[in-house]
Image (spheres, rainbow, N blue to C red):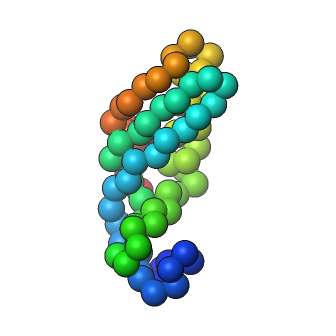
Amino acid sequence: MKCVVCKIGNTRPGRTSVTIEREGTTLVFKAVPAEVCDNCGEAYVAEEVTRQILASAEHAAHSGVQVGVQEFAGVAT
């Protein structure tokens, strides 16, 4: 797809990092599958992957985690 940010590049399958801050918790998910622009690097994460990340963030916040870094373990798109 054409990148909506730079309007020049096209996206390709790749990986990105996603940082979530919620209820005093900061989580970084590494190696998240995404469509990444070959020009500006903007990453687009699929809806199902986003759901999984948000569910993990919610669980971590309720578990008392303050800061966490983890490899994304969900299903690749």
Percent position (x, y) of residue 16?
A: 38, 53
Q: Please give the name of the residue rendered at 50% of the width and 63% of the height, measured from the top-left corner.
A: 44
Q: How many marks?
A: 0
* Side (left or right) of 67 relative to 4: left
* Side (left or right) of 71 relative to 2: left
Q: Please give the name of the residue rendered at 52% of the width and 84% of the height, measured from the top-left corner.
A: 7
The residue at the far right in this view is 23
* Side (left or right) of 17 relative to 58: left
Relative to 11, say whether 67 is above or below. Answer: above
Relative to 64, say whether 42 is above or below. Answer: below
Q: Please give the name of the residue rendered at 62% of the width and 23% of the height, measured from the top-left corner.
A: 24
The quarter of the displayed image where residue 57 is located:
top right
Percent position (x, y) of residue 14?
A: 33, 62
Residue 49: in sight, yes or no?
yes
Instruction: Using the image as rendered, state which of residue 60 and residue 19 is in the foreground.
Output: 19
Percent position (x, y) of residue 59?
A: 57, 22
Percent position (x, y) of residue 21?
A: 58, 34
Instruction: Using the image as rendered, state which of residue 23 and residue 60 is in the foreground.
Output: 23
